[in-house]
Image (cartoon, rainbow, N blue to C red):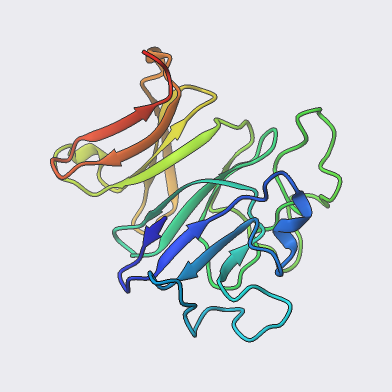
């Protein structure tokens, strides 16, 4: 759940393991939804007025979204999602855009077989991820770093890693492109579930390990 500067609420949803629903505009599954805090649908949502679509839908074609945060420099929503075996993604969801799952993906089934619906990694009318990992780190919560406490981390986005037990730091340039990647805390053996930046500029982590 993320609020933007206009007070709109963005809600991320996965496909619940039923791949075709992410391409079905009549379903909320595999979408980013955008609503007023009281549940009303904004009149400028991209599918308002279409009988074959849910009016709350902002973007679609998502698999299993895990993290979402408002970019502090552009004030635009970023999300991340699990691929299947490979193909974890960072996306910048735009109104009405299709992010491809399961038609395009950089991953395969856990069995090693291709995704049945997939045609490859590109298709007309479908967006490429802003960043992706060929080998899935099992990404989780995300947070941008815009504090002064650690100057070397400014203009970064932090993402937790469950499978590789690390804190991922993506360095961004002024255009928001990923120009570097660093893995932190890999020696701790902790599945990092969520990450936040506090008002003191410190980075706080939530793990799902018992110790």
Q: Residue 132: give x, y in percent of width and height.
A: 57, 43
Q: Residue 175 falls in which quadrant of the image?
A: bottom left
Q: Quadrant of the N terminus?
A: bottom left
Residue 172 higher or lower than 32, as above or below? above
Q: Would residue 29 appear left or right of 41 to someone viewing this image?
A: right
Q: Could you tell me which residue is drawn at 70 percent across and 69 percent down? A: 25
Q: Quadrant of the C terminus?
A: top left
Q: Residue 52: give x, y in percent of width and height.
A: 74, 77
- In the image, farthest residue toward the front: 38
Q: Is residue 2 visible to the viewer in this orientation of the structure? A: yes
Q: Nearer the viewer, residue 24 or 179?
A: 24
Residue 51 higher or lower than 14, as above or below? below
Q: Residue 68: give x, y in percent of width and height.
A: 44, 51
Q: Nearer the viewer, residue 37 or 177?
A: 37
Q: Is residue 182 visible to the viewer in this orientation of the structure? A: no
Q: Could you tell me which residue is drawn at 79 percent across and 49 percent down? A: 120
**Count of numbered marks:** 0
Q: Nearer the viewer, residue 48 or 137?
A: 48
Q: Residue 36: give x, y in percent of width and height.
A: 41, 73
Q: Would residue 134 appear left or right of 9 to someone viewing this image?
A: right
Q: Would residue 107 appear left or right of 5 to someone viewing this image?
A: right
Q: Would residue 133 appear left or right of 151 to someone viewing this image?
A: right
């Amino acid at each position: 759940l993320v609020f933007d500067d206009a007070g709109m609420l963005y809600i991320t949803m996965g496909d619940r393991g039923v791949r075709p629903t992410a391409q079905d505009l009549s379903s909320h599954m595999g979408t980013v939804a955008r609503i007023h805090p009281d549940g009303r649908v904004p009149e400028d949502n991209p599918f308002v007025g279409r009988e074959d679509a849910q009016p709350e839908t902002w973007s679609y074609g998502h698999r299993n979204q895990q993290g979402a945060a408002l970019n502090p420099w552009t004030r635009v929503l970023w999300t991340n999602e699990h691929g299947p075996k490979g193909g974890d993604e960072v996306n910048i969801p735009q109104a009405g855009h299709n992010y491809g799952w399961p038609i395009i993906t950089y991953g395969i089934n856990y069995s090693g077989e291709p995704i049945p619906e997939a045609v490859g990694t590109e298709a007309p009318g479908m967006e490429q991820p802003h960043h992706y990992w060929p080998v899935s780190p099992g990404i989780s919560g995300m947070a941008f770093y815009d504090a002064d406490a650690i100057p070397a981390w400014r203009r970064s986005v932090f993402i937790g890693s469950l499978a590789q037990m690390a804190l991922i730091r993506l360095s961004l340039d002024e255009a928001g492109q990923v120009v570097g990647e660093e893995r932190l805390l890999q020696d701790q053996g902790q599945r990092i579930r969520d990450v936040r930046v506090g008002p003191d500029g410190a980075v706080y982590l939530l793990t799902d390990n018992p110790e």
